[in-house]
Amino acid sequence: MVFSSIPFLYYFLPIVLCIYFIVPSKLKNIVLLLSSLLFYYWGEKVYTIVMIAMALSGYIHGLFIDRYRGTKKSKIALISSIIIGLSGLLVFKYADFAITNVNSLFGANIGLLNLVLPIGISFYTFQILSYTIDLYNGKAELQKNPLNFMTYVVLFPQLIAGPIVRYVDVQRELNSRKHSIEMVSYGAMRFVIGLSKKVLIADRMSEFCNVFRNQSQAVAFNSSIEVSVLFVWLYAIAYGLFIFFDFSGYSDMAIGLGKIFGFNFLENFNYPYISKSITEFWRRWHISLGSWFRDYIYIPLGGNRVAKWKWFRNIFVVWALTGFWHGAKWAFIAWGLMFGIILMIEKLFLGKWLEKLPSIFSRIYVIFFILISWIIFDAGMGAGITGNLTIAFERIKMMLGFGNIPFITADTIYYLRSYLVMFIIAIIASTPLAKILVNRIKENNIGRKIINVLTPITCGVLLILVTAFLVDGSFSPFIYFSF
Amino acid sequence: MNDKIKDISTVVVFMVIIIGLFIVNILKPPTKISISERRPLAQFPEVTWDSITRKKAKPTDKDTFMESFDKYTLDQFVGRDKLRELKANISFNLLMQKDNNKIYMVDGQVAKYWNNLNEGALKSAATKFNKIYNTHLQNMNVYYSIIPDKNYYIAKQNGYPSVDYNKFVGTIKANTNKNMKYIDLFGVLNVDDYYATDLHWRQEKIIKVAEKYAKEMGFTISGEYTENVKEPFYGTYYGQSALPIPGEKLIFLTNDVLNNANVRQIDAKTFEFVDGELYKEEYFKNVDPYDLFLEGTQKPLFIIENDNATTDKELIVYRDSFGSSLVPLLVEGYKKITVVDVRYMNTTLIDSNNLIDYKDGQDVLFLYSTEVLNNSSTLLVM
């Protein structure tokens, strides 16, 4: 089930909310657990068992790690939990990639597993690992109650597309949490804002990208449709806006729902497109993933407190893995390594230069490389182990004026005019401008009262608008499900 | 308003909307048909063990309960038409989008733009015409026409994406057997000859098309008809636009010749001929009111006999839905017209059951719209 669907909004959520707030506190986790399992089962059927098995594995390993704390057995339990956790990912996500590569490299003929990737497996695997690793390191407390642990793993607000919630961040709330009208109000508004980002902005940008893809596909079939340099740029911008509003919208919804149910999830995005360096971008984009790799891979490898070549090796490993985490395609690995290389260059010298540059230039630099990266990322959605890398390079060539296509065409003008307002709204909404404005207004008493009046009205209007857009068309799933 | 009241108000608004609409949706009796979209609406799906446990292996498999329920909730949502209207209004007026799901409006005409000219499909269409020609029509007078969609008259002129119609016609002509004569309709029609809310042409406006055929193919028609009005007519684009557009008049033309014509059609299951009608008035109430003409879609073959014809000429028309309203206007000029839609019965079945009586000297007309030609895989020429 997806948040931006009528069954979730107007059937699942009202029923769960009613039951959740009616039952006594000791039953609330069971309500969340059962509703989360139904939420997952709605779309995944048999893989629900895989998820339960993985969660049970994490729970049992936790018991062993804690029971044999200080002995080798504890370490063995930790290693076992990591191996079992990662084996799920390896089998479902990476096996066919490995087999295909072996087949093509050595001319072998090993049969593919052809398994469908269980939704959210990358997210819940990392969450389970954060528990066992932190428990072993003494950062997390043992969860003795299997139902509470299961609730942590399958909690529907963040189950299938993050943010990656670490056990330590919610361990107290799992056992006992408070609910308040302030939290429910904040959560509801945050949820509606996230929903609006997804349905009103991301899906419109996705529409634009689809127009472009259809255009460029039609060109390949010798159709009369024309693409242009400007169209490729607009596609790259639209895709960048789409992926931001799609994913950050989902994170907002997850954080909002978490608040309604009494959980405080950490922020996952912080206006990444205003960054002045790629290093800063990755501190603002998918924060929960970046910090996971930092804490569980980069720092254990030695981080930056090692010889320079080891430091760069660590960066290389982390970014190859970051790309690979997004999907078993060479396009994703290329995407991750591209960032790895840029980050190394920034650490070597570019970072200092960027600091001295007027911010307009450093921001243009960031946006340029991010747009290039999204074209490669989009290629990762293509078939085969490479994805559509060739198409991605073709598009980058076209963007840079080497594609033997006109700069602008009548079709480009049409789509630009048709989506211009949407582009302007999306670009403004991707900056903290509205937040700054609201905070300024709230600084005086009258302004605060005006915002207080507008908040519930905005909540209602956005919810009705989202419903109108959902009812009009078929829903489009969140892109981060496939990771 | 203080913070506390703001929080309470926000929670109340949120809960009232999601819980309120949940209750209203549960209580609302399901609607069977969407008049505005001209389609049956999804009903509450059957709950079976299989439907709730099965995973859909491929897109063509039967929907699971969950998928059917998703469709049911979308189709049956309370105030659906008003919500779609709201979305369309926001797209057009607030977001200043030039179209809503490719639907656009110019001077009261609603149209759906398209710009993906499929050259392969056009060549394939021509190849299919040639195949029929080579198999059956070599000693006949064979003509063909392309019916322009209304975008030809308004899309490019108003800045909307459009196909290159010269290339479209050129591709068909270049690949069609030269013994078949092309009759141009692009210069005969104009945008007012189409329904404002539908893709089809208006029968009362295409007498000039029939007259053009009469001139080019050598027959005569009186051109005098009685106008019969049905209203309100809401075309395909009315529902797709989701905008409050007034209904139109559907006019169908009759005269003594048409009233006395003998119409038969093939039963696609038994391959027996049964009675048919040029105008099935009760079909105006169908999901698609255009079904009134020649009994609507999925009717593969009609034979229309006119005992009052002044000649013994016979005509075979290979056609799509546009032909349904044009063919009655040709009846005066022929003793017998065979009307074939090869989208609903393939040529192998037609030939093996000898459903068409081919004779030397007959007239033959291939009459297809741009949309069908650009998707010519639907033409089942084997």
Image (tube, rainbow, N blue to C red):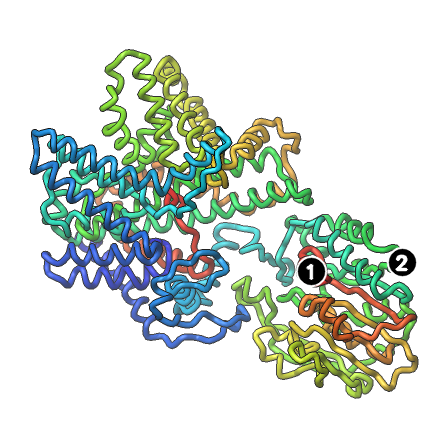
Chain letter of the residue carrying label 1: B
> Which sits earlier in the primary sequence, circle 1 or circle 2?
2
Q: Amino acid at mark 1?
A: Val
Q: Residue at x 25, y 22 (%)?
A: A301
Chain letter of the residue carrying label 2: B
Residue A291 rendering spot, x and y as whole percentages:
26, 31
The residue closer to the viewer here, A269 or B124, is B124
Question: Which numbered disc covers residue B179?
Answer: 2
The residue closer to the viewer here, A7 or A34, is A34
Circle 1 is placed at which residue position? Answer: B372
Q: Residue at x 86, y 86 (%)?
A: B307
Which image quadrant is residue B372 in? Answer: bottom right
From the viewer's perspective, tell me whether residue B358 is left or right of residue A149: right
- Badge 1 marks a residue whose secondary structure is helix
Image quarter (top left, top right, bottom left or bottom right) of the C terminus of chain B: bottom right
- Same chain letter for marks 1 and 2: yes
From the viewer's perspective, tell me whether residue A341 is left or right of residue B220: left
- Specify the farthest residue to the top: A307
Q: Residue at x 29, y 39 (%)?
A: A87
- Badge 2 marks a residue whose secondary structure is loop
Above or below, comparing residue A247 to residue B136 in the picture: above
Above or below, comparing residue B14 to residue A203 in the picture: below
Q: Amino acid at mark 2?
A: Asn
